[in-house]
Image: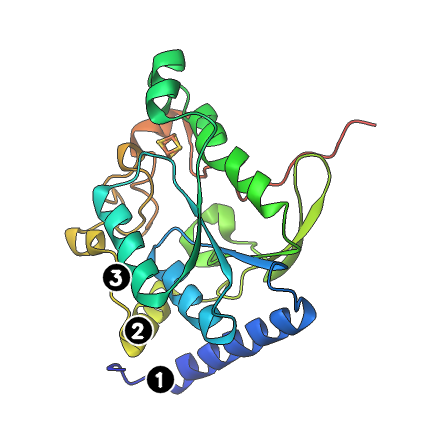
């Protein structure tokens, strides 16, 4: 551990640890709780804290086939070094099959592309658990400003899972200092200036220094796409 923490950040970390301990106590089965991990800084920090309490926690990664080579390499390094129980979620179609059948959807219909490569496989996997832990933070985007730390989440088909976001009130600085404190190596793409990292075709350097997600779907501003769809609940079923 190399970074000295402020009292406030120490308290935040202890609060997250207590929060996770309670979540695991409430859902004691090894297969009750999953954690989604994009291998961005907040997710890796949360994974570290969760694994201290439950080393075998199923860790879901959305392998869209479109990630940066650096993301795949970093995923594999952390998984091996920490012994992560990684669940690599694959879409129904390979990239080649999708592009051959529908063309380059991330250019023509990114919502559909995210639907097939992220939303469908994630919801199918999350439905197997009672509790879903995420590294979401309110500060990340306006669309996340009202994020609750605990909220029921309705999946397509009506099943509910309890969605926990213990880093909801954390700032980007909190995450970086805590990662340094724990000596967590970060995805090298941050060193190139990226502040939010998803699929390579839909990720560019931030266009607004005050908006860390401004590089996501930056070429799709006409469509105002800011989320992939996995944090948006299914609409209630028609009566
Ligand atoms: S982020 Fe882009 S490439 Fe990735 S699934 Fe969504 S539209 Fe497709």
Percent position of residue 196, x then y: 32, 49
Q: Say above or below: 151 vs 157.
A: below
Nearest-to-viewer mark from 2 and 3: 3
| Residues at discs 2 and 1 in contact (Cβ within 8 Å) | yes
**Circle 1 sits on which residue?**
6
In the rendered structure, which disc, 2 or 1, sits on the residue that comes first in sequence?
1
Q: Quadrant of the N terminus?
A: bottom left
Residue at 33 percent of width and 19 percent of height: 104
Nearest-to-viewer mark from 3 and 1: 3
| Residues at discs 2 and 3 in contact (Cβ within 8 Å) | no
Query: In terms of depth relative to the viewer, which is nearer, 4 or 99?
Result: 99
**Circle 3 sits on which residue?**
186
Q: Secondary structure at mark 2?
A: helix
Checking the image for residue 177, the label placed there is 2
Q: Quadrant of ligand 1?
A: top left
Nearest-to-viewer mark from 2 and 1: 2
Q: Quadrant of the C terminus?
A: top right
In the rendered structure, which disc, 2 or 3, sits on the residue that comes first in sequence?
2
């Amino acid at each position: 551990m190399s970074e000295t923490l402020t009292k406030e950040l120490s308290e935040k970390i202890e609060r997250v640890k207590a929060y996770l301990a309670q979540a695991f106590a409430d859902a004691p089965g090894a297969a009750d709780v999953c954690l989604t991990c994009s291998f961005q800084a907040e997710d890796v920090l949360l994974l570290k804290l969760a694994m201290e309490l439950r080393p075998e926690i199923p860790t879901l990664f959305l392998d869209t086939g479109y990630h940066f080579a650096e993301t795949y390499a970093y995923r594999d390094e952390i998984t091996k070094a920490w012994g992560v129980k990684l669940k690599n979620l694959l879409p129904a179609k390979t990239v080649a099959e999708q592009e051959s059948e529908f063309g380059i959807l991330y250019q023509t219909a990114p919502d559909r592309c995210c639907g097939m490569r992220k939303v469908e496989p994630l919801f199918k996997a999350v439905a197997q658990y009672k509790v879903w832990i995420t590294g979401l933070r309110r500060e990340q985007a306006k669309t996340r400003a009202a994020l609750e730390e605990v909220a029921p989440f309705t999946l397509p088909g009506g099943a509910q899972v309890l969605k926990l976001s213990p880093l909801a009130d954390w700032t980007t600085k909190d995450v970086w200092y805590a990662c340094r404190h724990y000596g967590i190596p970060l995805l090298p793409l941050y060193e190139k200036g990226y502040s939010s990292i998803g699929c390579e075709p839909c990720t560019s350097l931030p266009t607004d220094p005050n908006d860390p997600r401004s590089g996501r779907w930056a070429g799709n501003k006409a469509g105002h796409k800011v989320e992939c769809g996995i944090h948006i609940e299914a609409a209630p079923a028609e009566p």
